[in-house]
Amino acid sequence: MSEQIERVKCLIIGSGPAGYTAAIYAARADMKPLLYTGMEPGGQLTTTTEVDNFPGYPDGIDGPAMMVDLQKQAERFGTEVRIGMVTEVKFATEKGGVHTAIVDGKTKIEANSVIISTGATAKYLGLPSEQRLRGGGVSACAVCDGFFYKGQDVAIVGAGDTAAEEATYLSNICTKVTMLVRKGEMRASKAMQHRVAQTENIKVLFNSEVDEVLGEQVVEGLRIVNNQTNEKHDIEITGLFIAIGHKPNTDIFKGQLDMDEAGYLITTPGSTFTNLPGVFASGDVQDKIYRQAVTAAGTGCMAALDAERYLAEVGIVEEVIGGSY
């Protein structure tokens, strides 16, 4: 481990819309934030080819390009962005205490405040053809990418409320939605099951799994296998949506920060405060409902403002929230 220890006012763990927005606000408030990007600089949006629903981009924008823009904006105000993975943390439990983070197992950072923006990772099926076509028709967010398949035939994998909600959402813009359910029944609530059943252009295939995603550069079809009979058949689709859940990236915070049963960080309602003073959470790491770039950015802003107020209370920075728009 490096012998030299850095001390910063604000450490931001994770990039993406939440982390970079937090950095923009924190830097403008003279908190001199240090941001570590994590293993996937820019977060989940770096795997999205087009972002059409983020305000300010009337013609849409490529996901990675958008993250570059956000990073440049954060750096413009003085954020130091570093490539690296925070591998260990030790949070102070008393107000005004100093938090410690270890980066890549060797570099020690001390911080007066910490903003966690590590996000959540979508669960995929793990098929080689699926992974190859991510961004080419395979998506884990129907609300984000469904618009691009307007008037087309698509499929969705999943059996819970999220899958049912996304199937009904897609049914409003797509010609046909084929829903693949691995078991003989859905896990979704009865209300959501009724909604799916009553939607004419949704076809549910029970005991069905994806055997292979067809297509070279983009999705052209799906090979489906019945896990009871082992019979296979192909269907033509242009989009495949995976709705089998997300895993919040919170493993290194276990035992220190309060989480729900799925591992999402719990924040005080109406704020980004965690159960420990000076530690804040923003973006998908604490949001399992909306999971949108714009809502992540909003909570990133909130986290920076909450951190600024906290640092002012403990005498680290002068509160300038009124001028930090």
Image (spheres, helix red, strand yellow):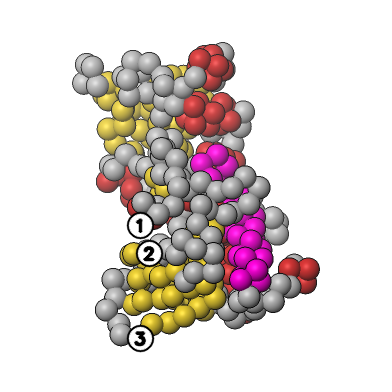
Q: Amino acid at mark 2?
A: Val
Looking at the rendered structure, the secondary structure element under dot 3 is loop
In screen coordinates, is 75 left or right of 15? right
Question: Where is residue 138, by image quadrant?
Answer: top left
Indicate whether 157 appears above or below 208. below
Circle 2 residue: 89
| Front one among 40 and 95 | 95
Circle 1 residue: 252
The magenta stretch spans which residues? 287-314
Asked whether disc 2 touches disc 3, contact meaning CB atoms under 8 Å apart, the reply is no
Q: Is residue 317 visible?
A: yes
Circle 3 residue: 4
Residue 254: percent from the left, percent from the top? 36, 51
In screen coordinates, is 41 left or right of 172? left
Q: Is residue 293 magenta?
A: yes
Asked whether disc 1 touches disc 2, contact meaning CB atoms under 8 Å apart, the reply is yes
Residue 309: percent from the left, percent from the top? 66, 66
Indicate whether 151 appears above or below 82. above
Mark 2 / mark 3, whichever is N-terminal: 3
Q: Label 1 to label 2, Cα distance in Å?
A: 7 Å
